[in-house]
Image (cartoon, helix red, strand yellow):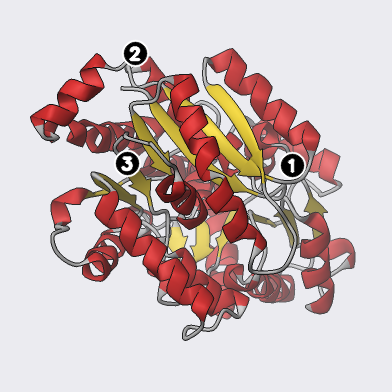
Amino acid sequence: MRTLFVTWDGPQVSYLESLFLPIFEALAAQGFPFDILQFRWGDAAQEQRIRERCGASGIGYRVHPIWRGVSGIAPFATALVGGRAVTVAARQFGSDLIMPRSLMPALATLAARGLDRPILFDADGLQADERVEFAGLSPTGAVYRVLRDIEAQIVRRSVAVLTRSSTASDILLARAGPPVDITRFHVVTNGRDTDAFHPGNESERRAMRQDLGISENAPLLVYSGSVGAQYRLDQAVDLVRHMRDRRTDSHLLVLSGSPADAASILTDAGCAGDSVTVRRSAPADVSRFLAAADVGIAFRAPSFSMQAVAPVKIAEYLLCGLPIVGNSQIGETKAAIDAGVFFDGSNHDAASWITDHILPSRNIIRQKAREVGIGTFSLGSTVNSYVQAISAFQSLPSQINLDLAGRT
């Protein structure tokens, strides 16, 4: 069964490269090939890099530009017109299954004329509600109502729905209503390749610190990922302040696809100079930066929409041997908490935890974190969860199965 993945990305987003391509490559090895239609705007070099990697992996790749005109209208216009791009890509690649990720690709899929393929919807959060909570979208306005309607329609039209938490499944089920039932939903993990994300060795970690200009024994905290209101980079700054009260050589490393935005937030928070370094890293280099640190920071603003997310950075931190300070109620954190490598509490208490518990036992903690990462967030476990969802199509009505089997 060949799947067309439909995604929507800007230049600051690297999820396609860092998260999904490894999953698709592993799925192809198990007999589930994928192709990609990416609605995107931004850096042409990034597009070329993705195209080359897809070509090397046997993954078909097409691009449709995102219009960036009148605020609020251009994305919907792109998605509606982009329905034809979905149909053309599905026919070109011989797709048996369409997998839109989030709401704009869902709208493009719904707008595709003559598209007779079944749909596997990757909800990947509650996008409309995130825009209300963190982007100022009115919960009573027309845009929110349209987004919620798209969400309900794509869930009803889909044979299966992927979510990142059971809570997200329950919310989407309640919103879609009958005849949708809970068997349509499949929780998948955001696992990472354990060979690509690893603690490295002492020599490699020392070399990275030298490159960053940070001493070998200085406590190094790392924040990796997007920046914005929901990611609470200001909390990371506060934690570093408490750390510097205990260890004046404590340092914060920020890895972000939007380094200018990150630097602006840090400046506004009064964090600059020799206590912080901001870097933009290629996806292939993230592991080396993380492995050089002592602690990973994974704060998110607790809210309704955050119940539906699974931060990728938690998997990356643990696999690279990092204990974590963050919000335990967001993402799969129980195993890490039980192992003593996840701290949820005030920044003052977190600083004490790091200096009194983590730093003196760094090598032991590194091993524990790695073990939790492998047990909870391996690429293999993620691939298995996707296979289970795709295999749900085996229970499709017989006529649809015959159509799929006979399609060339």
Res. 150 image quadrant? bottom left
Residue 380 to residue 269: above or below: above
Binning the other alpha carbons within 10 Å of mark 3 as few (below 14), some (14 to 19) or many (20 upward) gives many
Q: Looking at the figure, which quarter contains the N terminus?
A: top left
Between residues 55 and 176, which one lies in front from this camera angle?
176
Quadrant in which the C terminus is drawn: top left
Q: Mark 2 and mark 1 in contact (Cβ < 8 Å)?
A: no
Residue 306 in percent (x, y) is at 44, 68
Does residue 85 sit above or below 8 in this rendering? above
Of marks 3 and 2, the one in the foreground? 2
Nearer to us in this view, 240 or 44: 44
The three-letter amino acid code for the residue at tag 2 is Thr
Determine whether, in the image, residue 277 is placed left or right of residue 365: right
Q: Which residue is mark 2?
A: 408
CA neighbours of label 1 inside 10 A, class few (<14), some (14 to 19), many (20+):
some
Q: Can the viewer see residue 198 in this picture? A: no
Q: Tell me the SS state at disc 1.
A: loop
Residue 73: image tag: none
Residue to which mark 1 is pinned: 281
What amino acid is labelled 1 in the image?
A: Ser
Q: Residue at x 54, y 72 (%)?
A: 131
Q: Helix, strand or loop at disc 3?
A: loop
Name the front one of labels 1 and 2.
2
Q: Residue furthest front?
A: 114
Measured Cα–Cα span from mark 1 to mark 3: 34 Å
Question: Mark 3: which amino acid?
Answer: Ile
Q: Which residue is mark 3?
A: 119
